[in-house]
């Protein structure tokens, strides 16, 4: 179903009722838990949630408990988007026969379930054009199985399968451009967001649900365990990621890119890297040149986004 | 479970009641507890929006901590714009 876009200006505009309840077994200071909470606060109608395997699913639904007060289904790592497509079409059919009312459908997957394992089902669902919102909460590795690297892990980060040591200084490959991939499907709305800019994220969820077609939000959700920082810093670190231009937040509406937060005085990327244990090895004298390389990549990516923004609609 | 059943006779999977997570209290994970100083609180609701454990309760624009579920991560204290929340050591 298509909802009217009603942006919020202040937090008191949100409903008091909390559809993502306490009692889940996610870590203290968990970023993805904040994503789940803000998502359910943002939706104006009770959504149907399809959750791929990942931290959020494992931590919030230990049998026989569930923290979701909405219809929720767990599916395997790879097929959240496929199951969401089926639910959308089944709802359309039942609603046309007057047997049920319509509801927004949201698929949620982690970066493993989105960047790597689920990408095929997502590509299919976006291409077929089902009306649903896919949210990727990105904590930049397979955190719940013990911090294995994924296609979303940034260059230089140490994980258990890209450990920093004598052989390699952390992951040697760059992060995938996920929004670039989903835009290849000409979808009407795609955006990046992070939890520190909660109002921006909430409005993006509302805007995405107002489109009559597949929409996509990529939200950065720091992980206290895998990124190795104090749990109280989750939101602060996600803010730093934006302030250093490490994770730009932007949206692409009908092919037109708009950078949502322009960062008047960007901080050097070092400020972000030094807050996290997974980058600690980069500060050794022999690895300092990697920080310069990361800074270069960050600047290039920002310049690329500005070029696209200036050039006008890409499709 | 019998292996002689066909797929049509199988149960449809595990179904649990929504929100039953509330039956499991996570307050004993905590080593530090947040204390709100209401003389400094400006009811901005930022702590309520950002608590990963939904352990900040909101009544209108007033907030209070639900210690049954608070895991003591300290995000509320870190993000409070007026520093109205302090983390204090949990006494056993």
Image: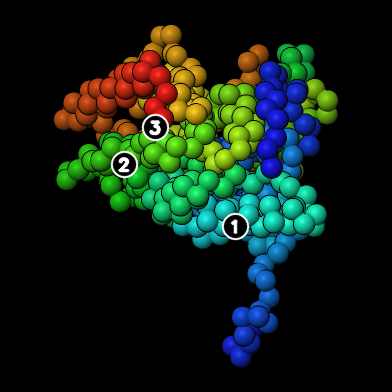
Mark 2 or 1: the one toward you: 1
Chain designation of label 3: A
Percent position (x, y) of residue A140?
A: 41, 41
Residue labelled with disc 2: A158
Q: Earlier in the sequence, mark 2 or mark 1?
A: 1
Side of B2 where A253 appears, left or right: left
Percent position (x, y) of residue A289?
A: 18, 26
Q: Above or below — where is B78 with respect to A102?
A: above
For the N terminus of chain A, which image quadrant?
top right
Chain designation of label 1: A
Q: Which of the pair A116/B60 is nearer the observer?
A: A116
Residue labelled with disc 3: A276
Residue labelled with disc 1: A86
Local packing at callout 2 (Cα closer than 10 Å; few below 14, some 14-19, many 20+) is many
Give the residue furthest to the front. A96
Q: Residue shown at 83%/29% (left/top)?
A: B59
């Amino acid at each position: 179903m298509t909802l009217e876009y009603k942006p919020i200006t202040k937090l008191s505009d949100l409903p008091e009722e909390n559809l993502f309840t306490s009692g889940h077994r996610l870590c203290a200071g968990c970023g993805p838990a904040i994503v789940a909470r803000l998502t359910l606060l943002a939706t104006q109608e009770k959504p149907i949630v399809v959750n791929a395997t990942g931290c959020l699913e494992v931590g919030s639904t230990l049998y026989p408990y569930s923290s979701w007060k909405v219809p929720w289904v767990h599916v395997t790592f790879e097929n959240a988007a496929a199951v969401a497509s089926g639910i959308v079409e089944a709802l359309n059919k039942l609603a046309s026969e007057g047997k049920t009312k319509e509801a927004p459908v949201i698929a949620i997957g982690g970066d493993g379930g989105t960047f790597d394992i689920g990408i095929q089902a997502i590509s299919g669902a976006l291409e077929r054009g089902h009306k649903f919102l896919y949210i990727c909460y990105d904590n930049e590795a397979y955190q719940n199985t013990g911090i294995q690297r994924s296609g979303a892990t940034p260059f230089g980060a140490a994980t258990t399968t890209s450990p920093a040591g004598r052989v390699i200084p952390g992951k040697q490959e760059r992060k995938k451009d996920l929004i670039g991939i989903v835009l290849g499907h000409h979808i009407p709305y795609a955006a990046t967001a992070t939890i520190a800019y909660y109002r921006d994220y909430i409005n993006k969820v509302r805007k995405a649900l107002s489109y009559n077609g597949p929409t996509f939000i990529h939200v950065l959700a720091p992980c206290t365990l895998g990124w190795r920082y104090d749990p109280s810093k989750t939101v602060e670190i996600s803010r730093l990621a934006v302030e250093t231009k490490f994770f730009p937040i932007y949206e692409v509406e009908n092919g037109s890119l708009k950078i949502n937060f322009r960062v008047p005085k960007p901080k050097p990327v070092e400020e972000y890297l030094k807050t996290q244990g997974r980058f600690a090895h980069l500060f050794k004298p022999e690895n300092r040149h990697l920080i310069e390389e990361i800074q270069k990549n960050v600047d290039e990516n920002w310049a690329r986004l500005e070029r696209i923004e200036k050039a006008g609609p890409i499709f | 479970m019998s292996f002689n059943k066909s797929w049509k006779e199988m149960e449809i999977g595990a179904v649990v009641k929504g929100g039953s997570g509330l039956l499991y209290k996570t307050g004993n994970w905590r080593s530090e507890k947040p204390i709100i100083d209401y003389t400094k609180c400006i009811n901005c609701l930022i702590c309520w929006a950002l608590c990963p454990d939904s352990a900040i309760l909101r009544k209108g624009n007033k907030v209070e901590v639900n210690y049954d579920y608070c895991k003591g991560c300290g995000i509320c204290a870190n993000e409070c714009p007026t520093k109205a929340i302090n983390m204090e050591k949990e006494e056993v």
